[in-house]
Image: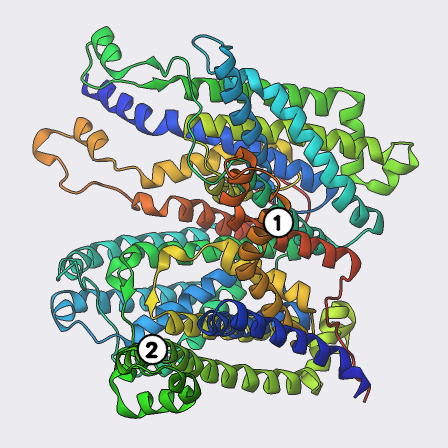
Amino acid sequence: MRNYKNVIAAYSIMIFLIILVGIFQSWSIALTILNYCLISAVMTIGANIQWGYAGLINFGIMGYTALGGLAVVLVSVEPVKKAWQVGGLNILACIWIIVAIIFVVKFILKRFDKSKLRNYSVASVILGGIILLRVTAAPGIEAIESVDPARTGFLGGMGLPVLFSWIFGALLAGSLAFVIGKIALGLRADYLAIATLLIAEIIVSIIKHEEWLARGVKNVIGLKRPAPYEIDLQTSEWFINLVTKFNSSKLNLINSISDKQEALNQMVIDASSVYVKLCFTGLFLTVVIILLIVTQKALYSPWGRKMRAIRDNEEAASAMGKNIVKEHLFIFILGSAIVGLAGAMMVTNDGLFTPGSYRPMRYTFVIWVMVIVGGTGNNFGAILGGFVVWFLWVEAAPIALFLINLFTSHLPETNAVRVHLIESAPYFRFLVIGIGLLLIMRYRPQGIIPEKIIKQ
Amino acid sequence: MDFLNAIIVLFNFTVIPALAYGSQLALGAIFVTLIYAVLRFANFATGDMMSFGTMFAVILTYYFQSLGFGLGVLPTALLTIPFAVLMMILYMLIIDKFVFSYYRIKKSPPVQFAMVSVGVMFVTQALIRIIIGPSDRRFLDGEKFIIKATEFKEMTGLAEGITLKSTQAITIIVTLIVVSIMFWFLNRTKTGTSMRAYSDNEDLALLSGIDPKRVVLITWVIAGILATIGGVLYGLDKSYRPFVYFNNMLPIFAAAIVGGIGNPFGAFLGGYVIAFAEIFVTYAYKRFISYLLPEHLEPDSLLQLLSTDYKFAVSFSILVIVLLIRPSGIFKGKVI
């Protein structure tokens, strides 16, 4: 039990902080933060599998997150029948062309020996295929995008319940990771970081600009939810009764009936948003706990030991007969799939898909800071990192504002320095995160909760 | 005549912008590559360091303008570069002293350095936004154009004109001057040779009496000069926006790796390779072709290989292809 003391202490502090936000700001904000903390925790579990278990540096987290988000649109949105009628055939044809290109290239690579001729023929097949793709796709894309462009203008999805998209998001991200892993995993660590960073940027720019797929920068709003809507709750009998029951003591203090009704209405509105967020919290918590149990089991299984062996000494592990390339690829896919799952969860939570908002700062580097700060190679640490860093990321601005006001309170309201500082309060989050990362890297490089090797 | 027109269209819309953009990338790429060669890590704070230097130039430009200083037809920003460079070098040395030197002495793996530079990136970005704010700033003054399209048309009697912005000319000229001085320094002076020796083999360099502290110091000084000048030139040409500089880091990395990371000359050419590729692939060739072909053959479509939305994607794809086929870059850089 002594071993877990610091873990329990760290988590208690974190929960206490979130409760403080609930008391001082509002419960709705506290739950929003908690939900995002949980989503971040899933991302850090994914990143931690790659970095902590296997030592793979993946700066492409943004790409997988965006793919997970795309999965939500592709799965849960109702199909746009008209778009399928006018351009569906072209898109399906394109998919077949892509498959054909891949098979032809594979065939050439397999059947012919390495030579200049082979390289040229592969290049010409790919180039010819791309031209063919463009010719086939162009009329279809134009037709699809002109179908009611203000509201749809894309193919839509499959119209399935939104929870399926979480699985689909993981699958999508995993399969992309397979391709990228095949290409890039042979590179040295920092090259891999740069390559994955840039590949993620390519993925996001494709999602942004291919409007037939998911409306691109025009965004998809009003996605399905696995939780009830606030409006429905506010009009349902049982929910109002529940709120009345919870707040009966407060309501009894109010005498006039009209005031009472008004207070109750306000409470119902507040409570409905809290209730919806609690539903999400429940779902996310389930995912985090399942992932935690699975990853924890994996970490201390023979497989986990093998991964650590490969991480710590590739040559020795290789000499022991472990297939390093295969294991690296596998763990790359696994981690990316979990990040994809988190991306899908996040879009479900927001209820909208905004490709323009995917920026490497927020979706790659902050996640990495979470992993490093929390503790690499330790799942509890990674999750804690997700909580701590996300909390700081959100609360840094209000805290900075408070401190600025405190330290400049002797200055007049119109003092230029004070006004400027107050205006730039939101940017203190970068400062806090950056300095936090630098301090942790310097004085506690193994993270808040370091990796623990249990001897068996 | 039509042939001449076609050439001029191509020159005006692709070659000139690509040369200017390529010069800006080249300066950044040499910065990345120098840090990689001597200090041995991929500096993820590149874009923000360039932005930091530019920020000083912007502030000083505003200050000089308020004082009434100026260079007449040339932008005032050129006058501020030396001061901005000094501030930048100071900032870099402070960062090195408090952050990087610890890991250098400990001989940490490059990955750790990269993560530390991510921390520096966050801090730099925060400082920039706190000091100058995230908004878009134009600080170009003086003459805007050297040749205007209409003047060119009058002069030559051609149907197409060439527009040469003064910022483009300044960018190309300044880049050539800076880069040639730098190559002269690296190849011909004793300090430059010692830097290259340190980069090739640290232990041997130490054995032959090269002072590592001095090499590191000189590297940061050169890096500061390159970063600031590259950043100011980019800001003059487009406009100064901190967010854009962070994004520019990605093609800069691509340029450095395509040219062979650790090889300054490769990085220099890599910048142009990336810039030309980006612009040639996303340029709509309709006007160019329509001059060359007889009238009835004129194409209907824009004849664009990829839409301009994919500008960045092009350079990243080139990078991926280079990494796949020749991971050491076009000009052999450090062996990976």
| Viewer-side residue, B148 vs A230 | A230
Pick the residue in front: B9 or A244: A244
Circle 1 residue: A406
Q: Which amino acid does label 2 sit on?
A: Ala
Q: Position of residue B163 (x, y in %)?
A: 31, 19
3D distance between C-alphas at marks 2 and 1: 35 Å
**The numbered mark 2 sits on a residue in which chain?**
A
Identify residue for label 2. Answer: A263
Residue located 38% across and 54% down the image: A205
Co-location on one chain, circles 2 and 1 = yes
Frontmost of labels 2 and 1 is 2
Q: How crowded is mark 1: few (under 14 residues within 10 Å), some or many (20 or more)?
A: few
Q: Is residue B327 visible?
A: no
Q: In the rendered structure, which disc, 2 or 1, sits on the residue that comes first in sequence? A: 2
The quadrant of the picture occupied by the N terminus of chain A is: bottom right
The location of residue B45, given as percent across then percent down, is: 61, 44
Residue drawn at 69 percent across, 73 percent down? A377
Residue flagged by tag 1: what amino acid is it? Leu
Snapshot quadrant of residue A235: bottom left
**Residue A112 got which mark?**
none
